[in-house]
Image (cartoon, helix red, strand yellow):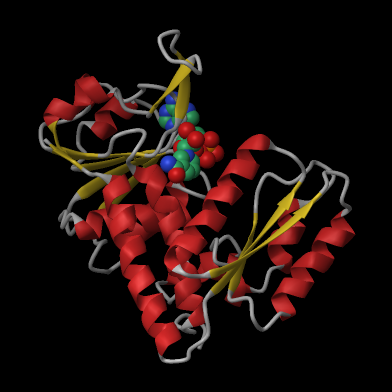
């Protein structure tokens, strides 16, 4: 069994980005600039955004945080988006979700210029991804593709079972892995809450991407020897022995499945750390005008 160390890989990629940014600056090029919009006072969102801003600083990007109160109107948010769309110094921006209930997330997403949509959530980017055209890939799937690539995990001709069909993880993962590409060429089965006999599917899998949100759901009896397990789930379970009263576990029962797997991502320290790296990579692509010219 080999552990896929997402934390170490994310740091390696951040170092690579930092070198590129330093070279860019030396040549007199423009410093990549990422903006984040945070509406309201959701503590988890505040932490995510703070981490994104810190990561920008670490690699030498410029970052801008637009922070507004929870009672900000939809119209005001759309104005902020328009301002960022039209600001030539901003290469990319994200609007941290969830937004307060009175704001239509779909409307805000559609208002973002696809050229600056470094979260890869706009239908233009999702459509381009589905067609195999250059696009900003959503952060979590992009991070997983990086892991498979850098750990040289063979995907061509393999049977991959994706568990969970969310728009941000399961569905894009199923599209990316079935594409004709270096990391791709899998035969993909996309499973979800209505799938009958999930175990029969997972037992046939060479690669399993678990994105369900249920602690320890994937157990040893559900996987075959040599399987590759990418565990996306982040679940809190009570743990009185921890100072904060809980610990984080994935969707796979790590102790049970790890001995049967050839590669596995831990939780925490696996897929999670790669997410911010993906955002930085998308911003760098935008500043280099790689996707839309
Ligand atoms: P979601 O919560 O939107 O949806 C869960 C999916 O699981 C649904 O498609 C549902 O059909 C499927 N599902 C539920 N019960 C099932 C069952 N019994 N059998 C098969 N499928 C079942 O999904 P999400 O937003 O992709 O999140 C999934 C998990 O991944 C969560 O724990 C979330 O916290 C985590 N997550 C982690 C990262 C990261 O960076 N590591 C990023 C995004 C999400």
Residue at image coords 83%, 47%: 69
Q: In which quarter of the image is residue 230?
A: top left
Residue drawn at x 40%, y 9% as measured from the top left: 241
Q: Residue at x 52, y 83 (%)?
A: 292
Q: Going 56% across and 57% down the picture, which residue do you hit? A: 53
Query: Is 205 left or right of 43, judged from the image as shown?
Result: left
Visible residue check, residue 158: yes
Question: Residue 76, percent across and down?
Answer: 87, 60
Where residue 194 sits: x, y (%)?
47, 30
Residue farthest toward the front in the current orientation of the protein: 26
Horizontal side, residue 88 vs residue 179: left or right: right
Count of numbered circles on the image: 0
Please give left or right for residue 233 compared with residue 54 in the image.
left
Residue 197 picture location, percent across and down: 34, 25
Question: x and y percent of residue 179 in the render?
Answer: 32, 64
From the viewer's side, name the closer residue of 70 and 216.
70
* Rendering quarter of residue 202: top left
Residue 187, above or below 132: above
Res. 130 image quadrant: bottom left
On the question of residue 186 being in view, the answer is no
> Relative to residue 21, is residue 280 depicted above or below?
above
> Residue reaching furthest bottom?
27
Q: Quadrant of the N terminus?
A: top left
């Amino acid at each position: 069994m080999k552990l896929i160390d997402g934390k170490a890989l994310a740091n390696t990629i951040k170092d690579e980005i930092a070198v590129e940014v330093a070279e860019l600056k030396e040549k007199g090029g423009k410093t990549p600039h990422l903006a984040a919009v945070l509406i309201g006072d959701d503590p988890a969102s505040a932490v995510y955004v703070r981490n994104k801003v810190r990561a920008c600083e670490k690699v030498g990007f410029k970052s801008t945080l637009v922070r507004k109160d929870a009672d900000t109107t939809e119209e005001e948010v759309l104005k902020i988006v328009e301002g960022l769309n039209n600001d030539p110094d901003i290469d990319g921006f994200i609007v941290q979700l969830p937004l307060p209930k009175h704001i239509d997330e779909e409307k805000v997403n559609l208002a973002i210029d696809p050229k600056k949509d470094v979260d890869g959530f706009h239908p233009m980017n999702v459509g381009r991804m589905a067609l195999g055209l250059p696009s900003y890939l959503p952060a979590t799937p992009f991070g997983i593709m990086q892991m498979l690539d850098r750990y040289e995990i063979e995907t061509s001709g393999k049977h991959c079972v994706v568990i969970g069909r969310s728009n941000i993880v399961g569905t894009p993962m199923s599209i990316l892995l079935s594409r004709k590409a270096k990391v791709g060429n899998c035969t993909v089965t996309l499973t979800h809450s209505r799938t009958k006999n999930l175990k029969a599917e997972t037992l046939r899998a060479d690669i399993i991407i678990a994105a369900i949100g249920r602690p320890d759901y994937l157990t040893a009896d559900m996987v075959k020897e040599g399987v590759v397990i990418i565990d996306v789930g982040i679940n809190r379970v009570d743990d009185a022995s921890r100072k904060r009263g809980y610990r984080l576990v994935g969707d796979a029962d790590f102790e049970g499945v790890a001995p049967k797997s050839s590669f596995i991502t831990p939780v925490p320290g696996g897929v999670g750390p790669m997410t911010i790296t993906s955002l930085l990579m998308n911003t760098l692509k935008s500043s280099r005008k790689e996707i839309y010219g």
